[in-house]
Amino acid sequence: MRGIGKKMGLKVMLIGGGGREHALAWKIASSPLVEKLVCVPGNPGMAQVAECVSMGASDLEALKSWAVSNRIDLTVIGPEAPLVAGLADHFRASGLAVFGPSQAAAALEGSKAFMKDLLKRYHIPTAGYQVFTDAAAALDHVRGQGAPIVVKASGLAAGKGAMVCHTLEEAEQAVHRAMVQREFGAAGNEVVVEEFLTGEEVSFMAFADGERLLPMASAQDHKAVGEGDTGPNTGGMGAYSPAPILTPRLHDRIMVEIMQPVIDAMAAEGRPYRGVLYAGLMIDGDVLKVLEFNARFGDPETQPLLMRMRSDIVPFLMASAVGSLAGMTIDWDPRPAVCVVMAAGGYPGSYAMDHPITGLESAMSLPDVQIFHAGTRRVGQNLVTAGGRVLGVTGLGDTVTQARKVTYAAVERIHWQDAYFRGDIAYRALSREAP
Ligand code: AMP
Ligand code: GLY
């Protein structure tokens, strides 16, 4: 299958229906190699560039049969849940080309306990930690350590299972939520209690072919719901690329001290990693530490990142899936991109749905703006809200100031009842930009 990256007329299937997948669909659909793109289940934004088929992403057997009978050349898995459930293995077992790690490799995201133990064994820098399966033992430990401290459900929790606790009382509550109330279900069977790190976060993503990495441009997410990074964590309220904190020197150190050692460790453990490896890193002066690994593209980092990717993405997806990344390079637009997530009021807590969305066409008419759908749904002719994160409004500019200006101008044109967005996305990059 090595030559497949050059084959024309590819049929590509993309699994997922969020903002990250809309950005991927938009990029894949623009590839001259692709004849047909099918998205499962997709969303109204993706329906503008692809055929959407409604099948549950959790029915592994149905997805595989569909891919076989429709002669799909490449399947791209967007979200973490099907990866952690083993969808990629299921496809590979039938000889299908699939972009995304095996279940054993996706454990880097699916089990924080596994990830932390791996990093420790291979001397890859991360926050000090202990793993607990018993609430009383976790509480004892937390009381011994004191605050600030971080309590994390080990399994998948849609980005909400990491609780940064500034007081002992909060930490006790966090243990209670995960282990007694079982707010995150089975994801809280194991809990990781971690040393609190200070510094600035950066998202570092690279294509991986099992042995080699091809790093992408840097990005920075905004996880907290409130401006100035306050309030509870969300899936991400906005992102931008590049992240100026990531100097070329830091980039090289991340590759040498973290990314390549993890790829080597996974291969040595019999879990070769193919797909995209996403490291969430904390940078504090010269100190670099891993906060988390994700087994897929970041959401919303992918939205600004792909706005900047000038190269066709399909050869990288193919090489990661079934070939080799050796000798490949990515061409990036030097202009920065900013993505502002527009969410339903109340998110990440409870929120209303089915509010009609207006102003999209006017917003999209602005130059260098793309609007990626996340939680939207069509009801007749109307587009309505259908989730917490609703849209990722993304814009390019010659400077971060310009990119923010065009992005927020687009945001201001879009309306629905109780829409919420942060007004300070990319504030860190802004503070580093020459006036
Ligand atoms: P995670 O899902 O592990 O990446 O955690 C989500 C968010 O919680 C991170 O992006 C950080 O903002 C914060 N966080 C996680 N671990 C730590 C830590 N050890 N120290 C400080 N903040 C953390
Ligand atoms: N934006 C953070 C994530 O994708 O997990």
Image (cartoon, rainbow, N blue to C red):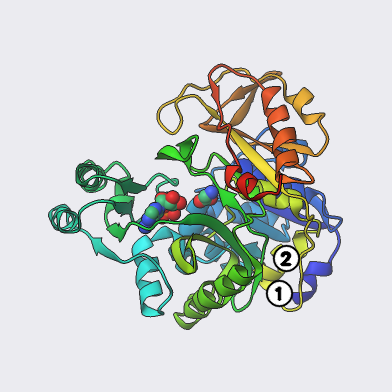
Are discs 2 and 1 less than 8 Å apart at CB?
A: yes
Residue identified by numbered label 1: 325
Residue 385 appears in view: yes
Left-right relation of 226 to 360: left
Q: Earlier in the sequence, mark 2 or mark 1?
A: 2
Query: Residue 359: where, in percent of width, then height?
Result: 72, 20
Residue identified by numbered label 2: 316
Image quadrant in which the N terminus is located = bottom right
Residue type, numbered disc 1: Leu
Image quadrant in which the C terminus is located = top right
Left-right relation of 4 to 411: right
> How dense is the environment of label 1, judged by Cα within 10 Å: few (below 14), some, or many (20 and up)?
many
Mark-to-mark CA distance, 2 and 1: 7 Å
Tell me the SS state at disc 1. loop
Compared with 21, 385 (above or below) is above
Residue at 59 percent across and 58 percent down: it is 245
Query: Residue 118: where, in percent of width, then height?
Result: 39, 73
Res. 230 mark = none
> How dense is the environment of label 2, judged by Cα within 10 Å: few (below 14), some, or many (20 and up)?
many
Residue type, numbered disc 2: Phe
